[in-house]
């Protein structure tokens, strides 16, 4: 399914679009291994003719199921594009593709949703990195030499200059 508009309808009035589209139809679930879109993408858009182009404004909402990039804990996040806006030219070099009288808005919606994905999803701002597991009975004591060897810089600590 695509989100399309008929340009002939825009000649006399603006259009209101309110519906949902699945994440699979937008191709959102194969983009990032830490982010999945389990449900539909909801949109409320107003499309209006503006000079030699069209202006699309509105709101787009999508629920994201993420894995924390640090601790791998699953969490949910709401991507709410309250001020979605795109201006599409119908003339010139950057003219949008028109098929008959129809313009497909789907790629523009998809692009803004993908840009709303977190680059490094974190379950909380202060999330700690996974700690190394030590074997039972091998816990390091404060000041113990084994703590220093776990550091990447431990070899430098042994240098005598």
Image (spheres, grey):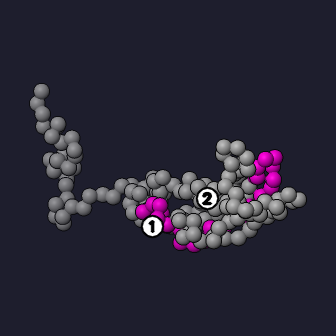
Mark 1 lies on a secondary structure that is strand
Residue 58 percent across, percent down from the top left: 73, 58
* Depicted 99 relative to depicted 1: above or below: above
Q: Earlier in the sequence, mark 2 or mark 1?
A: 1
Q: Please say whether residue 9 is visible from this viewpoint.
A: yes
Residue placed most toward the observer, 53 or 34? 53
Task: Identify the residue at the far front of this view.
Answer: 100
- The magenta segment: 29-55
Quick check: 42 above or below 147? below
> Is residue 128 found inside the magenta-colored segment of the image?
no
Seen at 59% across and 63% down, the residue is: 78
Q: How far across and how far down the image is residue 5, in percent? A: 74, 63
Quadrant of residue 34 in the image? bottom left
Q: Residues within 10 Å of mark 1 (few under 14, many from 20)?
A: some
Residue 75 visible somewhere in the drawing: no
| Residue on which the image places disc 1 | 74
Specify the label residue 107 is tagged with: 2
């Amino acid at each position: 399914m695509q989100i399309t508009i008929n340009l002939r309808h825009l000649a006399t009035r603006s259009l209101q679009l309110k519906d949902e589209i699945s994440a699979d139809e937008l191709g959102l679930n194969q983009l990032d291994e830490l982010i999945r879109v389990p449900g539909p993408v909801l949109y409320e858009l107003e499309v209006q003719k503006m000079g030699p182009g069209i202006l699309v404004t509105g709101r787009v909402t999508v629920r994201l199921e993420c894995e924390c990039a640090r601790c791998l804990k699953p969490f949910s996040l709401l991507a709410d594009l309250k001020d979605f806006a795109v201006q599409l030219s119908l003339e010139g070099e950057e003219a949008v593709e028109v098929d008959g009288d129809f313009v497909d808005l789907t790629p523009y919606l998809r692009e803004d949703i993908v840009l709303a994905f977190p680059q490094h999803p974190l379950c909380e701002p202060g999330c700690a990195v996974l700690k190394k597991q030590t074997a039972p009975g091998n816990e390091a004591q404060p000041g113990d030499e084994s703590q220093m060897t776990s550091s990447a810089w431990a070899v430098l600590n042994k240098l005598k200059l």
